[in-house]
Image: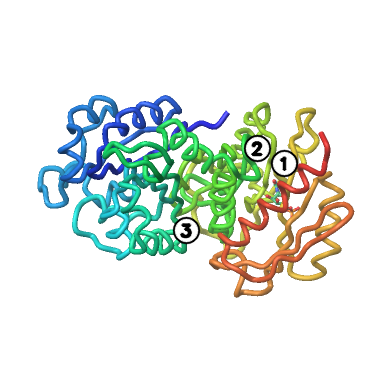
Amino acid sequence: MAHLFNRNIVLGVSGGIAAYKSAELVRQLKELGADVRVIMTRGSQEFITPLTLQALSGHPVHTDLLDADAELGMGHIELARWADLLIIAPATADLLARLASGRADDLLTTVALATAAPKLVAPAMNQQMWRDPATASNVATLNSRGIALIGPASGEQACGDVGPGRMEQPTNIAQAAAALFTRGVLAGQRVVITAGPTREALDPVRYLSNHSSGKMGYALAAAAVDAGASVTLVSGPVHLATPGHVTRVDVTSAAEMLEASLALLPACDLFIACAAVADYRPLAIAQQKLKKGAMRMTLELERTTDILAAVSASPQAPFTVGFAAETHDVERYARGKLEQKNLHMIVANDVSDTAIGFNSDNNAVIVFWPDGHQALPAASKANIARQLITLIAQRMEGRGD
Ligand code: C5P
């Protein structure tokens, strides 16, 4: 069933008689698991009090753009960033006009401009106002910007008219909101992604590591969340913010990454090994800082466990996807790893090309599976991640179990 667990919703309420239904909408959104913060326009407060929506949402209601006290708490930019979804219900004809023209003359329209979150708008107005060409043109503008509209429904109106203009029922708005997050190709799947480098200690202050930035793994985590999955990142040390709704487990060494990955297997449907794991670690970690002396020194190293191979060999093996960073003979080496590590898919990239790969924001890959392959030409890592998630979901579905 569609739900809104862990989702932050800003509900904007504008000044129409349907504002009284917003109280029920807040309740329904909370019931589906969302955390709801309400913004009310000045007009809406003539129809319903902030106190009602504060009691139902469990948070103070936001009303003013230029309120120094409110800005000290959660200001308009924080609200805009906090939101995973902005719902405006009811949206009056005036509000649609202000949204369409990009105005920022109150808190609600300012947050609407300042947020990157998707928007779901439920218009409510007199049927003649809804039919007016000015409103129709504003609606077309909002549609063209990818803003989702729900309703209005038709029927008898508060003013006595009959026709389109009634706000959509709160239950339908809440369900539409939940559906926005569960439509993805990985809906309901539990995904574990390893990312970043590992560090293998030599002594208390030194380690062996590599240049992996973690960007590809983090982009995959964000894309998997967008595709409806619940995602855990097992991350080596990186300088990246955790994508929204991702659970992050921080590890340092290959051994820690192995342990964390295996512990997650009982609740894992898809394992993507994106980390650049050290293949060798020092045989012994010096207890004290190694002192310089001789002109040469030899380090003795031992192999680390291959995490991905261990996952695919486990009795609880999920769908497994590996990465292969190659400098030459990309297909031969990638297919070799696909087979040796017993994987469902492998994503190969040519790291001899400095425009893509490790620290770059771009990547280009070829994905191989036992009876096929597909090239994904150079694009941002976010874009490649979205394409990979789609491809992986297709292969998982085609597996038939
Ligand atoms: O064999 P190679 O290191 O090239 O394989 C790369 C793939 O294997 C990547 O998906 C990487 O995350 C994974 N790997 C691993 N554990 C290791 C070494 C590599 O999971 N110790």
Q: Residue at x 54, y 65 (%)?
A: 359
Q: How many neighbours does mark 1 have within 10 angstroms: few (below 14), some (14-19), or many (20 or more)?
A: some
- Regarding mark 1 in the picture, which secondary structure is present there? loop
Q: Residue at x 69, y 39 (%)?
A: 270
Q: Given contact means CB atoms under 8 Å apart, are the residues at marks 2 and 3 in contact?
A: no
The verdict on label 2 being within 8 Å of ligand 1 is yes
Which amino acid type is shown beneath numbered disc 1?
Answer: Thr
Residue 106 at what x, y percent from top left?
Answer: 19, 54
Mark 1 vs mark 3: give the one in front.
3
Tell me the quadrant of the picture where the N terminus can be found: top right
Considering every residue shown, the one lying at the far front of the view is 161
Q: Give the farthest residue toward the right.
A: 371
**Label 2 SS:** helix
Crowd band around label 3 with a 10 angstrom C-alpha radius: few (<14), some (14–19), many (20+) = few
Around disc 2, counting alpha carbons within 10 Å, would you say few (fewer than 14), some (14 to 19), or many (20 or more)? many
Displayed quadrant of residue 294: bottom right
121 on left or right of 303: left
SS for callout 3? loop
Taking depth in this image into account, of 44 and 5 the one nearest to the observer is: 44
Disc 1 designates what residue? Answer: 305
Height in image: 337 above or below 259? below
Residue picked out by circle 3:
146
Give residue 10's position: percent from left, percent from top. 33, 42
Mark 1 or mark 3, earlier in chain: 3
Residue at image coords 36%, 53%: 130
**Residue 221 place in picture, x, y as percent:** 56, 47
Label 1 beta carbon within 8 A of ligand 1: yes
Mark 1 and 2 residues: CB-CB less than 8 Å, in contact?
yes
**Residue at mark 2:** 258
